Image (cartoon, rainbow, N blue to C red):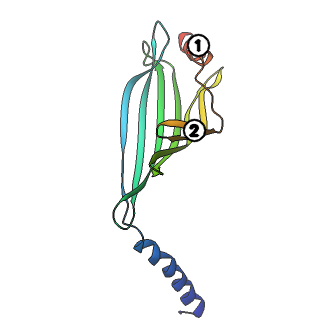
């Protein structure tokens, strides 16, 4: 039975949807899955730590009602499988990360905003190395804002991960 409350609800929803569809062109979207086998990640001097990387990407491009590009947004997820190049059947460290990326033009400048956990590798006995999480903003490829738990990739991180794989 169609009541007055249901009717008001339907009208309210339609009044929200119609202006949104009239004010912008339909966004484009896509994505894919990409595999990068044996990517050299860390040079330990006498061997490399390699990374079998599986990346999933989805993206959307947004346009105004005239079809002009307004902004883009992408979501990435990464599954990492790190191993000693000399012992590919030996010890592996598995990890994952995810990031959201938006970019647009404002005042003639290209702005990028990235949020999420772009990097973080947990090494048994050493903890989390190469850790970056939070957000950062770039304007015309220059870093202008950083928030969250970020660290520089320091030599101690490289030494620790190399020692872990060297001792396995």
Residue 15 place in picture, x, y as percent: 50, 81
User: Image quadrant of residue 159?
Assistant: top right
Of the pair 149 and 35, the residue shown nearer to us: 149
Q: Which mark's residue is nearer the viewer, 1 or 2?
A: 2
Give whichever of 118, 122 is nearer the camera.
118
Labelled disc at residue 144: 2
Question: Where residue 103 sits in the image (x, y, percent)?
Answer: 46, 48
Which residue is pictured at 36% across the width and 38% down the height? 34
* Marker disc for residue 159: 1
Q: Residue at x 41, y 45 (%)?
A: 57
Please determine whether, in this image, residue 1 is positioned above or below residue 50: below
First in sequence, mark 1 or 2: give its number: 2
| 79 relative position to 36: left or right | right
Crowd tier of the residue under label 1, counting other residues whose Cα lies within 10 Å: few below 14, some 14–19, many 20 or above: few
Q: Relative to 82, does residue 113 appear above or below in the rendering? A: below
Q: Nearer the viewer, residue 121 or 19?
A: 19
């Amino acid at each position: 039975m169609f009541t007055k409350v249901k009717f008001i609800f339907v009208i309210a929803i339609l009044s929200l949807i119609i202006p949104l569809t009239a004010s912008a062109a339909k966004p484009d979207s896509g994505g894919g899955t990409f595999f990068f086998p044996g990517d050299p990640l860390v040079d330990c001097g006498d061997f490399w730590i390699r990374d079998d990387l599986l990346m999933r990407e989805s993206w959307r491009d947004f346009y105004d009602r005239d079809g002009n590009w307004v902004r883009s947004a992408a979501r990435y997820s990464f599954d990492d499988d790190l191993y000693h190049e000399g012992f590919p059947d030996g010890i592996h460290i598995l990890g994952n990360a995810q990031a959201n990326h938006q970019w647009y033009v404002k005042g003639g400048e290209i702005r990028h905003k990235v949020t999420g956990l772009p990097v973080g590798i947990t090494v048994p006995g050493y903890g989390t190395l190469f850790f970056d999480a939070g957000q950062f903003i770039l304007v015309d490829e220059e870093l202008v804002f950083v928030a969250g738990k970020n660290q520089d990739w320091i030599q101690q991180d490289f030494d620790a991960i190399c020692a872990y794989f060297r001792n396995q």
